[in-house]
Image (cartoon, grey):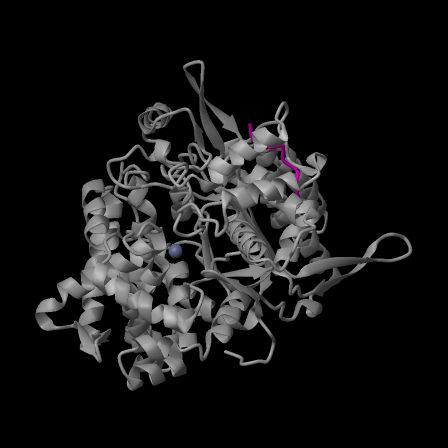
């Protein structure tokens, strides 16, 4: 890791902080590559409204109301209420809607409904986002109950066992239908024994009108068509300056998908995209992840643009060229291993633009496409986001977190020395070989694990990485300098899973988010299964709880046992066993310990969630109106960027 004096910090409010990321070596890209990045970036920013509407049907109207208030407010900007209003606005922008991006709970405003009503009344009516036939009082009455009534639309995604997940979730994928109706609707569409099943339901809203259930497809001329047409406009420009033929073909297929909504096209596109691993510039653009759909089918819109980090990519090349060795030597049952791990591409990239569900909170690693048959037959592409990880790491050093929660000085020193390399390798193994490993038994329904699928899949990839971290093969390949570095990874993982990750959970609540459920499941399962031999122990010092690993080698074997079981669950589609694992180990929080952790954490005055502002990419034109350079500027104003995006990239009508 490079220590530098670049100022990454941009803003901090409530439980969120905002950083900026750097664009290393951007200027050494060719003009054509830079222009390609610019067009793809415009396509990435153009889909923003789609995500807002998917998250909740009132989100766009609320956002536009807030933008209008900020634009026209002439009262006292130093008043406490107005400051609290701005904090609420910043949180909503961070979450792309009024529900917390991570916990899914509706955000609570720090000001009164009356204050909000007066703010709205202060805006010239023509600036307010009124629906046809709606007047200002109607708007006020709708929005104040949506925002202030705590019981109304309380959660974006509700996956509690035993409730109607569709009815209880505020996300906007279903309208007027029950969970049972949705299940039946899609069960009737499954083609049995299709070796290449499309991602059913991925790009649509399901509605019931006059007793009839149907899908409203996201496409040109369909739902979200206005924003999709803008995305297509920029993708068509990008196609002209693509780096090679493969990339051009891929973009063409993506455009066709956006125009038709045809899921077969989507798969064709993903096959082309997965195969294209050699380009310097790459992107993600589409309906990708299904975390926000309680039923795990419908995908939120996201986009990124990136370019290769050549030096760091060498590391992942070593991993992928040994992928078969990892598969053959994993502790998984032989019948659930791939005989041939094909086409795993992995590289380290730098982000040039984040959009949709990747903005402002960005992933650290990405492995796509998601369709199981493409992963098996064609392979998948895996990336680590170097400039994002660097911004995180460098801005977190010396914030006191490690000192507060680590078991002892040995652990602190080890982590300071090796964390950067060991965390990077853990991510690489998770993405490059973890997700790509294993196979389903013949006839297993890829959706059998339903709402538990994401957490179990993350656990499978994490365990694969954890198991191999401490293998001698890793030092032999030069991926880690020694075993101590692997121990640093185990320390961090267990400390996080058993103690600190619950700083993201409100008192009295359970763990909902898939990655957190995964970490809790792994940590608590290995703790319980190593208890007899005291592999991991909790201990108290000055009334504070710590975690210590006593036997790293034994822990590695237990990681392997759990990996074997979770692969079996996935391969056989054993819903019951998967559910039990998650419900027993991944969901519950020890109330007393939780309170202690929250108290210790609060004293550090840190924000558990990080998001990023994007740089501005600015085309420079010559006399003939041709682009002859793309300049970039870093941005230091978080709210300013949100307001700017709200003006420049808003294409959708309001949901009614
Ligand atoms: Zn993953």
In-image side of 616 versus 214 (left or right): right
Q: What stretch is highlighted in magenta?
A: 648-656
- Give residue 153's quadrant in the image: top left
Q: Magenta span: helix, strand or loop, mainly?
A: loop
- Furthest residue in direction left, as rendered: 532
Q: Nearer the viewer, residue 191 or 5?
A: 5
> Residue 526: within the magenta?
no
Asked if residue 426 is positioned above or below residue 80 in the image, the reply reads below
Q: Nearer the viewer, residue 556 or 652?
A: 652
| Above or below: residue 340 compared with residue 252 | below
User: Is 274 positioned to the left or the right of 252 in the image?
Assistant: left
Q: Which residue is drawn at 87% across and 52% down?
A: 625
Residue 378 visible, this orientation = yes
Q: Does the magenta stretch include residue 653?
A: yes
Q: Can residue 560 be seen in this view?
A: no
Query: On the rendered structure, is 277 left or right of 177?
Result: right
Q: Would you say 519 lies left or right of 132 here?
A: left
**Residue 409 rendering spot, x and y as whole percentages:** 30, 86
Q: Position of residue 338 (x, y in %)?
A: 31, 52
Residue 231 vs 312, above or below: the answer is above
State the count of labels: 0
Residue 600, quarter of the rendered image: bottom left
Q: Position of residue 401 (x, y in %)?
A: 38, 75
Quadrant where the C terminus is found in the figure: top right
Q: Nearer the viewer, residue 452 or 146?
A: 146
Ligand 1 is found in which quarter of the picture? bottom left
Picture residue at 53% right of the left edge, 40% below the top: 59
């Amino acid at each position: 890791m490079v220590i530098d004096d670049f100022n990454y910090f941009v803003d901090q409010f409530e439980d969120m902080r905002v950083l900026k990321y750097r664009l290393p070596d951007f200027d050494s890209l060719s003009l054509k590559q830079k222009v390609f990045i610019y067009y793809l970036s415009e396509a990435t920013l153009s889909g923003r409204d789609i995500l807002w509407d998917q998250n909740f049907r009132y989100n766009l109207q609320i956002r536009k109301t807030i933008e209008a208030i900020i634009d026209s407010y002439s009262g006292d900007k130093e008043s406490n209420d107005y400051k609290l209003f701005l904090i609420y606005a910043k949180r909503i922008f961070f979450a792309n809607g009024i529900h917390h991006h991570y916990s899914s709970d509706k955000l609570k405003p720090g000001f009164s409904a009356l204050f909000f009503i007066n703010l709205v009344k202060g805006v010239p009516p023509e600036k307010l986002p009124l629906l046809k036939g709606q007047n200002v009082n109607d708007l006020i009455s709708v929005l104040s109950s949506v925002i202030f009534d705590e019981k109304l639309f309380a959660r974006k995604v509700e996956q509690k066992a035993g409730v109607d997940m569709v009815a209880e979730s505020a996300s906007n994928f279903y309208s007027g239908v029950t969970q049972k109706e949705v299940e039946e609707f899609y069960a009737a569409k499954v083609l049995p024994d299709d070796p290449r099943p499309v991602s059913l339901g991925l790009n649509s809203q399901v509605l019931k009108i006059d007793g009839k259930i149907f899908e409203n497809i996201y496409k040109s001329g369909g739902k979200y068509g206005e924003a999709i047409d803008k995305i297509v406009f920029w993708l068509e420009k990008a196609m002209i300056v693509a780096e090679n033929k493969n990339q051009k073909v891929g973009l063409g297929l993506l455009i066709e998908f956006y125009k038709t909504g045809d899921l077969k096209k989507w798969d064709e596109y993903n096959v082309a995209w997965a195969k294209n691993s050699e380009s310097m510039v790459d992107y993600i653009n589409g309906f990708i992840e299904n975390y926000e759909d309680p039923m795990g089918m419908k995908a939120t819109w996201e986009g990124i643009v990136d370019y290769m980090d050549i030096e760091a990519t060498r590391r992942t090349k070593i991993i992928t060229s040994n992928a078969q060795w990892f598969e053959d030597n994993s502790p998984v049952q032989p019948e659930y291993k791939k005989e041939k791990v094909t086409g795993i591409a992995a590289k380290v990239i730098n982000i040039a633009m984040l959009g949709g569900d990747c903005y402002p909170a960005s992933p650290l690693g990405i492995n796509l496409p998601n369709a199981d048959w493409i992963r098996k037959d064609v392979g998948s592409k895996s990336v680590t986001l170097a400039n994002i990880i660097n911004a995180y790491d460098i801005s977190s050093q010396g914030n006191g977190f490690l000192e507060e929660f680590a078991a002892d000085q040995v652990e602190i020193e080890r982590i300071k020395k090796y964390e950067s390399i060991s965390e990077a390798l853990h991510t690489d193994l998770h993405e490059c070989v973890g997700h790509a490993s294993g196979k389903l038994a013949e006839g297993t329904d890829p959706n059998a694990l339903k709402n538990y699928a994401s957490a179990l899949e993350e656990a499978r990839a994490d365990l694969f990485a954890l198991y191999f971290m401490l293998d001698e093969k890793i030092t032999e390949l030069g991926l880690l300098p020694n075993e101590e570095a692997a121990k640093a990874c185990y320390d961090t993982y267990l400390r996080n899973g058993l103690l600190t990750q619950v700083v993201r959970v409100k008192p009295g609540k359970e763990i909902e988010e898939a990655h957190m459920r995964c970490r809790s499941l792994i940590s608590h399962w290995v703790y319980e299964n190593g208890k007899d031999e005291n592999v991991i122990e909790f201990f108290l010092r000055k009334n504070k709880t710590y975690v210590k690993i006593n036997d790293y080698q034994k822990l590695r074997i237990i990681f392997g046992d759990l990996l074997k079981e979770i692969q079996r669950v996935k391969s056989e589609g054993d819903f019951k066993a998967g559910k039990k694992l998650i419900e027993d180990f991944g969901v519950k929080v020890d109330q007393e310990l939780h309170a202690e952790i929250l108290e210790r954490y609060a004293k550090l005055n840190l924000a558990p969630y990080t998001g990023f502002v994007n740089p501005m990419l600015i085309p420079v034109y010559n006399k003939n109106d041709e682009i002859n350079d793309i300049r970039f500027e870093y941005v230091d104003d978080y709210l300013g960027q949100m307001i700017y995006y709200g003006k420049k990239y808003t294409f959708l009508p309001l949901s009614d």
